[in-house]
Image (cartoon, coloured by chain):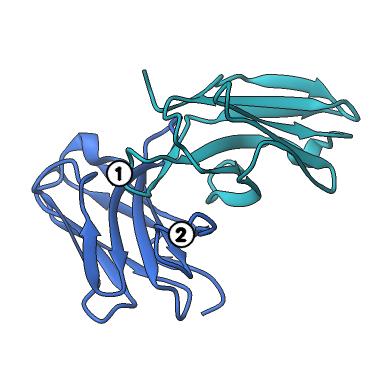
Chain colours: A cyan, B blue
Amino acid sequence: QKEVEQNSGPLSVPEGAIASLNCTYSDRVSQSFFWYRQYSGKSPELIMSIYSNGDKEDGRFTAQLNKASQYVSLLIRDSQPSDSATYLCAVKTRGSQGNLIFGKGTKLSVKP
Amino acid sequence: GAGVSQSPRYKVAKRGQDVALRCDPISGHVSLFWYQQALGQGPEFLTYFQNEAQLDKSGLPSDRFFAERPEGSVSTLKIQRTQQEDSAVYLCASAKLPKASGANVLTFGAGSRLTVL
C-alpha cells in the first residue's frame, strides 16, 4: 500500500460546481498535510496546508482533515476552467523522516 | 532570488552520458530537496540538504545519482551513465526552515526535464 493514495481521475465537473478531491494516508502519526496544484508542464504550487482535525477555508478552497479516518480532502467551490489541473496531496509522515510524501495526483477538468 | 531557479529546463542525453542539473534556491532558505517526477506520477523524494549538509539521501535510486550543495546555496544533481528509466522531470524545492518543522512549506522550481534516448 502506498503511503499516500489518491484517485488519479480524471474528475470532471461543470463550471460553478463543487469539486471534491480526496486523499488517504497510511501513517497514523502523520502531522502535516498539504495540497499542491500542478498545471500541465509546470511545477507544483502550494494551495493549502492543514495540521489539525476539521476544516480550513481559504477563499474558494476548503481543506478537511480527519486523522481518525486518515483522510484529507480538498473542496473547490464555484469551480472555474482555470482550476483545471492536477491536484497533489502531500503528507509529512513519521516514516518518511520528515520528508513530504506525495500522492500520484488527481486530474481535475472543469468544463465551461 | 525571488523563486527557485533550475537549469537546464530541458536536457536530452544519450544513454550512458553524464548529466548535471542545477538548482538555485530562494536566498536564505535552509532546506533544499530534490524530487523526481515521472510522467503521470507524483514527485518522489530523492535527497535533502540542510544548508551544506546532505542529511538524507534515502531516495536516490542508485549510486549513479549524486547531489551536492557545497556552500549551502546552489545545489547540483548529477546522474552518471544515464539510463532510459532516468527520464523524468527533476524538481528542486527549497524551504525556509529545517524539514523537521511541521509548518515547513516547500517552494518548487520549474523543474528540469531529462530525456534519455
Q: Is residue B117 left or right of residue A1?
A: left
Q: Name the residue rendered at 31%, 68% in the picture.
A: B50
Quadrant of residue B54 in the image?
bottom left
User: Crowding near pointer 1: few (<14 within 10 Å), some, many (20+)?
Assistant: some
Q: Name the residue rendered at 54%, 25% in the picture.
A: A70
SS at badge 1: strand
In front here: B87 or B57? B57
Amino acid type shown at disc 1 = Thr
Give the image location of residue A40, x and y in percent: 58, 41
Residue A33 in sight? yes
Circle 2 marks a residue in which chain? Answer: B
Quadrant of residue B73 in the image?
bottom left
Quadrant of residue A83 in the image?
top right
Q: Badge 1 is on which residue?
A: B115
Q: Name the residue rendered at 79%, 22% in the picture.
A: A13
Residue B117 in sight? no
SS at badge 2: loop
Q: Badge 2 is on which residue?
A: B101
Give the image location of residue A100, x and y in percent: 43, 45
> Is the residue A41 above or below the residue A73 in the image?
below
Amino acid type shown at disc 2 = Ser
In front here: B37 or A41? B37
Give the image location of residue A101, x and y in percent: 42, 39
Q: Work out which quarter of the rendered image holds the C terminus of chain A and state it.
A: top right
Callout count: 2
User: Crowding near pointer 2: few (<14 within 10 Å), some, many (20+)?
Assistant: few
> Is the residue B19 above or below the residue B1 in the image?
above
> Is the residue B1 above or below the residue A45 in the image?
below
| Dots 1 and 2 on the same chain | yes
Which of marks 2 and 1 precedes in the sequence? 2
What is the C-alpha distance between the residues marked 1 and 2?
A: 35 Å
